Image (spheres, rainbow, N blue to C red):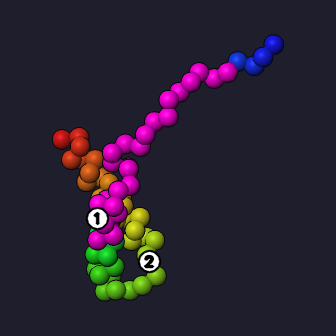
């Protein structure tokens, strides 16, 4: 007896909010640089700045899509 195959589930594409585009990356990069400037250009926080900027930008985009 063959094992049952799982039901076919079509691959889901990422939502528009999370899809990475050059425009989205530019917005995140700009916001991350703004955070860097707010710390008076104190280095060593690049990843933290990027992640915070990414969260802020995608949250703003999600709000616009929900409206």
Image vertical order of residue 13 relative to residue 20, above or below: above
Image vertical order of residue 65 relative to residue 44, above or below: above
Q: Pick the residue in front: 50 or 15.
A: 15
Q: Is residue 56 visible?
A: no
Q: Secondary structure at mark 1?
A: helix
Q: x, y (%) of residue 18? A: 38, 50
In-image side of 10 versus 18 (left or right): right
Q: Which mark is residue 45?
A: 2
Image vertical order of residue 54 relative to residue 35, above or below: above
Which callout, 2 or 1, points to the residue nearer the camera?
Answer: 1
Q: Secondary structure at mark 2?
A: loop
Q: Pick the residue in front: 42 or 26.
A: 26
Indicate whether residue 26 is drawn in magenta: yes
Residue at point 35%, 56% (across, down): 21
Q: Main secondary structure of the magenta part?
A: loop
Residue at point 43%, 40% (across, down): 13
Q: Residues within 10 Å of mark 2 (few under 14, many from 20)?
A: few
Q: Is residue 46 visible?
A: yes
Which quarter of the rendered picture does the C terminus lie within?
A: top left
Image vertical order of residue 15 relative to residue 55, above or below: above
Disc 1: which residue: 27
Q: x, y (%) of residue 2? A: 78, 17
Q: Residues within 10 Å of mark 1 (few under 14, many from 20)?
A: some
Q: x, y (%) of residue 47? A: 46, 71
> Image quadrant of residue 57?
bottom left
> Image quadrant of residue 60?
bottom left
Span colored in magenta = 5-30
Q: Pick the residue in front: 47 or 28.
A: 28
Indicate whether residue 10 is drawn in magenta: yes
In-image side of 35 versus 50 (left or right): left
Q: How many marks?
A: 2
Q: CA distance from mark 2 to mark 1?
A: 18 Å
């Amino acid at each position: 007896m063959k094992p049952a195959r799982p039901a076919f589930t079509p691959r889901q594409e990422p939502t528009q909010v999370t899809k990475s585009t050059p425009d989205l990356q530019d917005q995140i990069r700009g916001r991350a640089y703004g955070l860097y400037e707010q710390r008076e250009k104190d280095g060593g926080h690049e990843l933290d700045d990027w992640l915070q900027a990414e969260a802020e930008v995608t949250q703003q985009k999600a709000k616009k899509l929900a409206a």
